[in-house]
Image (tube, rainbow, N blue to C red):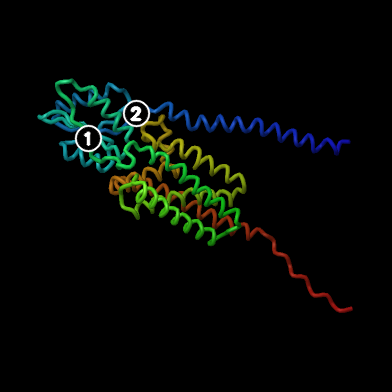
């Protein structure tokens, strides 16, 4: 009798575990994605101010009324402020001139932030002194609101995850696994650039630079999956999914800006592959590579660590496998 009830008890515990685990995972995923989106607001958003000292001080005081919202950078004139916007040092700039006030924006950097600045600066200007708005780096015509760009990170993460999982499940090890990850990621980057740039027109930069960033993003995610699974086994897949698909996408800030997310969340997102990949892609697609160095370094570190774990983990597994001695031939009786 005990032997008959043991499988039933085990099945009952597994059923209970699933019933508890699934709602918990659902609640966690909803919190991870919904909480940052519900708390979007500017937090130390870099913005420039240029013009005569007295007028610039007045603008800075006006911006300071939004406590903690803006991080003001001062510039000497219009040209310096425009260069700062083009270099991605600031998201926009307020320039005070004898002819009036001018607002410089960069909708390619974030349509949401560009709209916020127009509302905060131009929308509150007196009717007899309108603010002239100039979009210094405009978003591509194929994606003026940035919706396609923001939605592109999840497919990249899924492609990277599929690459890493397939490499492990197909039994590829060592240098063969590294070559497979690198080759598949490079091809994925070229396909992504062909779709996003050549077909949809949502990217407008150098084609090969865009393909390189897309491929490096896929490689960083795929190598993370393969490396952690090689070291930890199946739990490595779960940890990789949490880092790159859940946290990486939800904390990337690509639908708005990292500085629009709750404090610390945007910074964390830029240290994860999706956020770094999105920032690097913005830089090469609209800003001629300005400010791409940091995100590219983050992607390279993830890719290098994942590839090293994949190669070294497989080597350790082979070294730990005991060799079976060859049996001696039997002597004839």
> In the displayed image of the protein, which residue is found farthest to the front?
199
Checking the image for residue 42, the label placed there is 2
Relative side of 221 to 140, left or right: right
Relative side of 31 to 59, left or right: right
Image quadrant assignment for residue 8: top right
- Front residue of 84/159: it is 159
Q: Residues within 10 Å of mark 2 (few under 14, many from 20)?
A: many
Inter-mark Cα distance, 2 to 1:
17 Å
Marks 2, 1: nearer the viewer: 1
Percent across and percent down for residue 41 are 36, 27
Q: Residue at x 74, y 70 (%)?
A: 326
- Front residue of 320/222: it is 222
- When the figure is inspected, residue 49 is found, relative to residue 208, above or below; the finding is above
Checking the image for residue 104, the label placed there is 1
- When the figure is inspected, residue 79 is found, relative to residue 212, above or below; the finding is above
Percent across and percent down for residue 161 are 52, 47
């Amino acid at each position: 009798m005990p032997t008959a009830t043991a499988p039933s008890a085990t099945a009952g515990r597994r059923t209970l575990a699933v019933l508890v685990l699934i709602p918990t995972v659902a609640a966690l995923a909803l919190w991870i994605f919904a909480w940052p989106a519900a708390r979007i607001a500017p937090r130390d958003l870099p913005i420039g101010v240029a013009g005569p000292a007295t007028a610039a001080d007045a603008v800075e005081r006006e911006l300071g009324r939004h406590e903690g919202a803006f991080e003001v950078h001062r510039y000497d004139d219009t040209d310096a402020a425009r260069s700062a916007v083009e270099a991605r040092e600031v998201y926009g700039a307020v320039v005070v001139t004898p002819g009036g006030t001018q607002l410089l924006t960069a909708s390619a950097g974030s349509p949401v932030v560009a709209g916020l600045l127009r509302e905060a600066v131009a929308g509150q200007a007196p009717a007899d002194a309108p603010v002239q708005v100039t979009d210094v780096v405009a978003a591509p015509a194929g994606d003026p609101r940035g919706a396609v760009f923001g939605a592109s990170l999840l497919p990249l993460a899924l492609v990277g995850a599929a690459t890493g999982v397939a490499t492990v499940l197909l039994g590829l090890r060592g240098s063969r696994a590294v070559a497979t990850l690198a080759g598949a990621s490079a091809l994925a980057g070229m396909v992504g650039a062909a779709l996003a740039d050549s077909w949809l027109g949502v990217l407008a930069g150098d084609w090969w630079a865009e393909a390189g960033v897309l491929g490096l993003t896929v490689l960083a995610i795929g190598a993370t999956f393969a490396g952690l699974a090689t070291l930890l086994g199946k739990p490595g897949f779960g940890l990789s999914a949490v880092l790159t698909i859940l946290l990486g996408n939800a904390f990337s800030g690509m639908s708005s800006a990292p500085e629009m997310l709750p404090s610390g969340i945007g910074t964390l997102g830029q240290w994860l592959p999706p956020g770094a990949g999105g920032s690097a892609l913005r830089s090469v697609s609209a800003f001629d590579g300005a400010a791409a160095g940091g995100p590219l370094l983050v992607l390279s570190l993830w890719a290098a660590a994942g590839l090293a774990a994949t190669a070294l983990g497989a080597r350790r597994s082979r070294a730990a496998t005991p060799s079976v001695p060859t049996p001696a031939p039997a002597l004839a009786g």
